[in-house]
Image (spheres, rainbow, N blue to C red):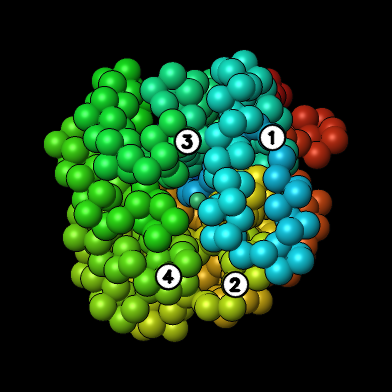
């Protein structure tokens, strides 16, 4: 705890703080056990965390700044959803019904449903509809405490539509204030116009789409669906080699429906993350550990597909592989918007502890997006991306399947979702209410 405190003189404090949130339980989510500061304060300056510690220590600073007293509430880092397909159009309710009747995801995909049906709807939608629908989805997730999102392409599958998806993802970030990490997922499915010509499609994605979109500044990382109904390890390797040449980090949909040795493949490229992992074997776990690749668990897809094979959580834990939890928000296999729900499912189905689940949507999710220097924990100098909760014990956030526990969400020191009358609660200092 001492390491995250930052003693400064009262004089400097007077100059530096824009606002202090006081009387709260702080959950810094820094490495090690999820230690909390029960009666704490957190001070913000220029959109960053400038100080945090106990109320006793805060009072000793004699800081002259506005105070927001939120006695008894919990403060966590803003949640990070590190795996979503939230830019998309259309619904796949018919497939939900078919799956309830016993048809498998792979069978639906072979019949031309699955990803292909969302591709059709997304291509028809165009930029503005994708951006406005996606914006609504992100605002809803903000109200559940998620302040940073990874958003994948992969429902366009041609240059024009993949570009529209990635531009929509960027626009959603601008419109909502949320931080957005864009991922090129050109190798999500083979589009109809390339039927039976998968190699030609891979060449198009690798030699044409990816370099063009990267040059346009639309790609923060590169992903692929490595699966028998997706792309082979050899095809993924071609994509990842190009990504590497372009200086882009990679991540992978790995071992979701079968063991394709996807985790080991991702690790061999130093991937930021390997995601799903239901069928990952021991060698895959060891490779992830050696590479420092984050295992992203997606229990929403496990639930919706009525999967029975669980990811090797005990082995991942024993090997020290950082585990993140994400929604996999998509219309076909995981229509889940809420990270609270995803955490609950990760605990119930996969055996994560509430502390592990919370680390999975904060610290480890930040690591999966390569932004742990910037967010994911409450530490001095990091961006003030915060979620404040009307709970006494943070495990309540994981326990609940309701999404109504958030008090407020903050991005870069600005309150973007608030409880009613939050502004009137600011009681001391210059009263400028600048943070709002
Ligand atoms: Zn996915």
Q: Which residue is mark 2?
A: 307
Image height of 322 relative to 111, above or below: below
Say which quarter of the image contains residue 301: bottom right
Asked if disc 3 is less than 8 Å from ligand 1, the answer is: no
- Please tell me how crowded label 2 is: few (under 14), some (14-19), or many (20+) other residues with Cα within 10 Å: some
Q: Earlier in the sequence, mark 3 or mark 4?
A: 3
State which mark lies toward you, 3 or 4.
3
Q: Which mark is residue 26?
A: none
From this view, report whether residue 18 is shown above or below residue 393.
Answer: above
Picture coordinates of residue 373 (x, y %)? 34, 45
| Front in this rendered view, residue 264 or 83 | 264
Instruction: Tell me the tag on residue 90.
Output: 1
Where is residue 84? Give x, y as percent: 54, 45
What SS does tag 3 mark? helix
- Cα separation, mark 4 vs mark 1, equals 27 Å
Name the one closer to the observer, 281 or 271. 281
Q: Which residue is farthest front? A: 196
Query: Which quarter of the image is occupied by the C terminus?
Result: top right
Q: Kindly check if marks 2 and 3 are in contact, taking CB atoms under 8 A apart as contact.
A: no
Q: Position of residue 18 (x, y in %)?
A: 56, 29
If you read the primary sequence from the N terminus, does the residue marked by circle 2 or circle 3 appear first? 3
Circle 3 Cα neighbour tier, 10 Å, few/some/many (<14 / 14–19 / ≥20)? few
Residue at the spot 38% in from the left edge and 82% down from the top edge:
315
Q: Position of residue 253 (x, y in %)?
A: 41, 55
Q: Secondary structure at mark 4?
A: loop
For disc 3, the marked residue is 192
Q: Disc 1 or 3, which lies upstream in sequence?
A: 1
Q: Quadrant of residue 176?
A: top right
Q: Which of 369 and 51 lies nearest the eye of the viewer?
A: 369
Provide the residue designation for mark 4: 258
């Amino acid at each position: 705890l001492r390491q995250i405190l930052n003693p400064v003189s009262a004089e400097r404090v007077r100059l530096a703080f824009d606002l202090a949130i006081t009387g709260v339980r702080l959950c810094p989510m820094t490495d090690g056990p999820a230690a909390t500061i029960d009666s704490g304060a957190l001070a913000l300056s220029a959109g960053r965390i400038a100080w945090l510690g106990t109320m006793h220590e805060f009072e000793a600073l004699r800081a002259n700044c506005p105070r927001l007293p939120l006695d008894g509430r919990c403060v966590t880092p803003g949640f990070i959803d590190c795996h979503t397909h939230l830019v998309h159009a259309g619904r796949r309710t018919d497939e939900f019904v078919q799956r309830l009747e016993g048809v498998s995801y792979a069978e639906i995909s072979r019949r031309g449903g699955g990803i292909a049906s969302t591709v059709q709807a997304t291509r028809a939608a165009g930029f503005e509809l994708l951006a406005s629908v996606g914006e609504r989805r992100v605002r809803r997730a903000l109200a559940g405490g998620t302040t940073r999102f990874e958003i994948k392409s992969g429902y366009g599958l041609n240059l024009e539509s993949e570009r529209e998806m990635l531009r929509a993802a960027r626009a959603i970030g601008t419109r909502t204030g949320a931080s957005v990490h864009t991922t090129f997922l050109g190798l999500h499915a083979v589009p109809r116009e390339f039927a039976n010509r998968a190699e030609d499609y891979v060449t198009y994605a690798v030699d044409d789409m990816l370099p063009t979109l990267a040059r346009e500044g639309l790609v923060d990382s590169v992903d692929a669906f490595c699966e028998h109904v997706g792309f082979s390890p050899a095809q993924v390797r071609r994509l990842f080699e190009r990504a590497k040449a372009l200086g882009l980090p990679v991540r992978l949909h790995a071992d979701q429906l079968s063991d394709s040795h996807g985790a080991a493949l991702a690790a061999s490229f130093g991937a930021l993350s390997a995601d799903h992992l239901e069928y990952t074997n021991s060698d895959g776990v060891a490779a992830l550990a050696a590479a420092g690749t984050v295992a992203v668990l997606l229990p929403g897809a496990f639930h919706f597909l009525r999967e029975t094979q669980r990811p090797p959580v005990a082995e991942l834990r024993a090997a020290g592989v950082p585990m993140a939890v994400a929604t996999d928000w998509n219309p076909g296999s995981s229509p889940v918007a809420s990270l609270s729900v995803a955490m609950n499912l990760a605990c119930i189905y996969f055996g994560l502890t509430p502390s592990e689940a919370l680390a999975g949507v904060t610290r480890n999710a930040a690591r999966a997006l390569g932004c742990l220097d910037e967010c994911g924990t409450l530490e001095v100098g990091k961006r003030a991306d915060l979620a404040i909760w009307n709970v006494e014990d943070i495990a309540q956030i994981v326990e609940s399947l309701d999404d109504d526990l958030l008090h407020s969400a903050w991005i870069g020191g600005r309150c973007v979702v608030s409880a009613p009358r939050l502004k009137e609660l600011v009681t001391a200092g210059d009263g400028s209410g600048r943070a709002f």
